Image (cartoon, helix red, strand yellow):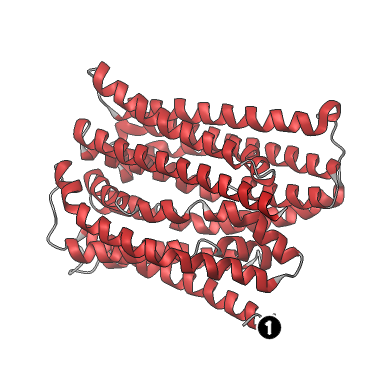
Amino acid sequence: MSKKISSEFIGSLFSTYTSQVVSLLSSFLQVILINKNFGVDIYGQLVVVASTAGFFSSLLTARSSETVALFFKREQLEGNDESSKFILFLGLFVDLLTAIVLVLLIYALSNFIAAAFLQDSNLSDEINLYSYVTFFVFLRGPFLGYLKAKEMFLQINIVTMLESVIKVSLIAILIFYTTQLDLKRIVAAFLIASIAAFSVAAIFASTSYAEDYKRDSFVVEFNRELLKEYWNFNLKTFASSTLKAGSENIDNLVLGYFLNAESVGIYQTMRKLFFPLSFLTSPLPMLMLNKMITAYSNEQFKRLNRIISSTNKYLVVPIFLISIAVYLLAKPYLTYQNIKIVDDFNIIFSLMLSYFVLSAFQWWMRNFIVMHRPDIPIYTNALLSLNSIWIPILLFNLSYFSSKGLLTISLASVLAYFPSWLIGIIVYHRFVRLKGVL
């Protein structure tokens, strides 16, 4: 049995990292194609538009993918098939309603967003169009949650790869087969990719669901107690996400407001350099979620600690090597895209590296906090949001930092993120001491 589990995990790990490689390469190629052919200012506009949609997504989402995975898995482990079906349909309803509200909200504010952060009110149509990209991202959330609970990681990775490949392929087609290269066409390409990813996720989940429940697939029993529990849990995750909205892509919006879209494009092009660090650790929360849930639910706290500590030990050397490689490639990468190397490059690089290294080693934190104290993210996200807003605004209003755009926003990101990261570490160490693990 252990060999079977081990081989299944290795297979999931391989497919997930393959997906991450494809997504990473597609993302790099996408940035290069846009910067070289559309211009870094157009790329900056795209980032601001996506950041705005991301901000409102965080403001409204209750993270149904995560919630559905947690509740569905729990009900299945307890043999409650009817309850697991109810959870899935509940997640679909909540995300559909939220997606509709999101589109209406973005439409209502698009003129203000275009004028304030893009400094061009004529780009409101592009913002409205991008709202539909986010609409389909929302709708696929419960389907991905179901696939996570079923440990169908290959299917999840196919969805991820498909979206990435379609995006970069359509951008390449625009460059080589059309003469009009503008932001609206890029957003349209993203929308096509989002619809395709949603469709494939829905097909995968529906096919598996039909096999599991056969004739009774659409017969769902209402469960008042489970609805109450799900609702209470969702209120906490909703509050957590809403409070975190201030930290989601706020750096791009602050740069767009105080400087311009071109500065945003340069900033995000530099941050792309560190995506190999994200690539290294981003599959781990999904791959380790069920293992962590099982260990925590069965009160196997030493096993839970071993999962976290042993994984982090394996990460030390790869993170160090990636950091060196990224530094060596940084200047040629930027120069190739006709981006000037700024005077404070080494300091900016060090600040960005610090942010991504901290993020890499905390891959486990969200899974643990949601299981142990789902109320804590409410406070940490509120703190992170407040810090992400007032710290960069304060720095940009100081004479020394006002003219150092990339340095200022990079420093602000680290200062805003560190307190929330430290709180998570303190909570975990108190937990392991209380349970006698250390």
Identify the residue at image location x=37%, y=33%: 124
Residue 104, percent from left and from top = 53, 35
Q: Tell me: residue 147, above or below residue 332.
A: above
Among the 4 quarters of the image, the one containing residue 289: bottom right
User: In the picture provided, is 401 more to the left or to the right than 268?
Assistant: left
Identify the residue at image location x=73%, y=40%: 88
How many numbered callouts?
1
Residue 398, percent from left and from top = 23, 69
Quarter of the figure that contains the C terminus: bottom right
Tag 1: residue type? Answer: Gly
Whether residue 261 appears in this view of the structure is yes
Label 1 residue SS:
loop
**Residue with the most extreme front position:** 3
Residue 182, percent from left and from top = 27, 27
Q: Tell me: residue 253, above or below residue 374.
A: above
Among the 4 quarters of the image, the one containing residue 26: top left
Residue 406, percent from left and from top = 23, 58
Q: Nearer the viewer, residue 263 or 302?
A: 302
Identify the residue at image location x=26%, y=54%: 258
Q: Tell me: residue 248, above or below residue 118.
A: below
Whether residue 119 appears in this view of the structure is no
